[in-house]
Image (tube, grey):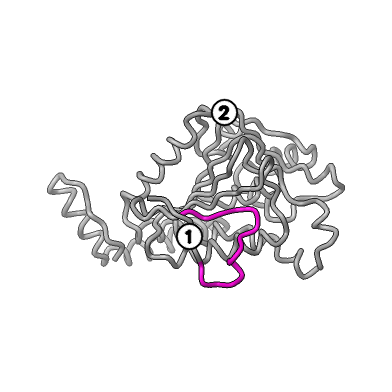
């Protein structure tokens, strides 16, 4: 059963432009952008999104988090006037807030359709998996405003597609269609428009079948070694492997493999 999620923190008493749904049966939480028709992300919403991801990260009932949107478009970006009205201190936190999905220890899936522009694209880039429908489009259009991406978009994109393609996207404010995004490695999967929900559900169930401990370890290792040298990355990988070798989940995985049965992981 799906129901709205409540939080004790007073700052989350009235969510600004989005809602949170918790499906305990499937150990899933959905963060749903809900300011139709374009799901523009307001300044206060950024702070709340960060707080929500932090709260869900601590919730033992949640294994996988999905970031999606109501309507035809994921998000056309941020509230443009909000940038002019925000204080320098608030603006300086933009990238930190939008990086919340990356800091979250649990797997985070972005389900993108329609416009996924500006901060909508940037927060999707901070997720672990991006599923996009065939008519979806990604863009960082800030150059048209005399600005640059300010929430980590150009930095994260360059790690994925390299400097040449990032310059093409950022400096020309280019829109990248779904198929090209998949071919360039920006999107994890490109699916028909009417299959986005089913593809998201399937990925959630696939991720739930793995050890929560191994998933958290893999995500942190990959994030932490993104900028590391090969020798450092291999060293850290070895330490993580050694720690997991002592876990109940690894023992269960080995036993299940030899018994030719599905493993029942507990996250310990």
- Residue furthest out toward the left: 259
- Of residue 251 and residue 262, the one placed in the foreground of this image is 262
Give the residues drawn in magenta, as a range: 7-21
The residue where tag 1 is placed is 5
Instruction: Work out whether 62 lies above or below 33.
Output: below
Q: Is residue 146 left or right of residue 153?
A: right
Q: Whole-percent x and y of residue 175?
A: 71, 34
Which residue is label 2 attached to? 134
Do callouts 1 and 2 mark residues in contact (Cβ within 8 Å)?
no
Secondary structure beneath dot 2 equals: loop
Identify which residue is drawn at 31% across, 62% down. Answer: 267
Question: Which residue is nearer to you in this view: 138 or 8?
Answer: 8
Queried whether the magenta region covers residue 20, the answer comes back as: yes
Q: Position of residue 174 (x, y in %)?
A: 75, 35
Please state which of residues 63 and 37 is positioned toward the viewer in this rendering.
Answer: 37
Q: How many marks?
A: 2
User: Alpha-carbon neighbours of circle 2 within 10 Å: few (<14), some, or many (≥20)?
Assistant: many
Nearer to us: label 1 or label 2? 1
Residue shown at the point (16%, 54%) measured from the top left: 255
Spot occupied by residue 132 in the image (x, y as percentages of width and height): 55, 36
Q: Is residue 58 visible?
A: yes
Q: Residue at x 50, y 30 (%)?
A: 191
| Distance of label 1 from label 2 (alpha carbons) | 31 Å
Q: Earlier in the sequence, mark 1 or mark 2?
A: 1
Q: Is residue 109 left or right of residue 165?
A: left
**Looking at the image, residue 25 lies above or below residue 238:** above
Q: Is residue 154 visible?
A: no
């Amino acid at each position: 059963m799906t129901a709205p999620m409540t939080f004790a923190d007073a700052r989350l008493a009235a969510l600004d432009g989005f809602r949170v749904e918790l499906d305990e049966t499937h150990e899933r939480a959905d963060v749903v952008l809900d300011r139709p028709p374009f799901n523009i992300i307001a300044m206060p919403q950024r702070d709340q999104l960060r707080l929500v991801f932090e709260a869900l990260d601590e919730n033992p009932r949640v294994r996988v988090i999905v970031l999606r949107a109501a309507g035809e478009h994921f998000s056309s970006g941020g509230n443009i006037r909000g940038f002019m009205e925000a204080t320098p201190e608030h603006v300086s936190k933009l990238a930190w807030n939008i990086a919340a999905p990356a800091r979250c220890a649990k797997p985070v899936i972005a389900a993108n359709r329609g416009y996924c522009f500006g901060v909508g694209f940037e927060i999707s880039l901070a997720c672990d998996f991006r599923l996009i429908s065939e008519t979806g489009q990604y863009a960082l259009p800030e150059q048209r405003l005399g600005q640059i991406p300010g929430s980590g978009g150009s930095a994260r994109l360059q790690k994925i597609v390299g400097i040449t393609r990032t310059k093409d996207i950022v400096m020309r404010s280019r829109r990248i269609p779904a198929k090209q995004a998949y071919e360039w490695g920006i999107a994890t999967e490109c699916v028909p428009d009417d299959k986005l929900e089913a593809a998201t559900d399937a990925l959630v169930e696939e991720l739930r079948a793995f050890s929560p401990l191994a998933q958290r370890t893999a995500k942190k290792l990959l994030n932490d070694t993104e900028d590391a040298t090969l020798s450092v990355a291999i060293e850290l990988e070895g330490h993580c492997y050694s720690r997991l070798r002592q876990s109940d989940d690894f023992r269960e995985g080995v036993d299940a493999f030899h018994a030719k049965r599905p493993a029942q992981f507990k996250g310990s």
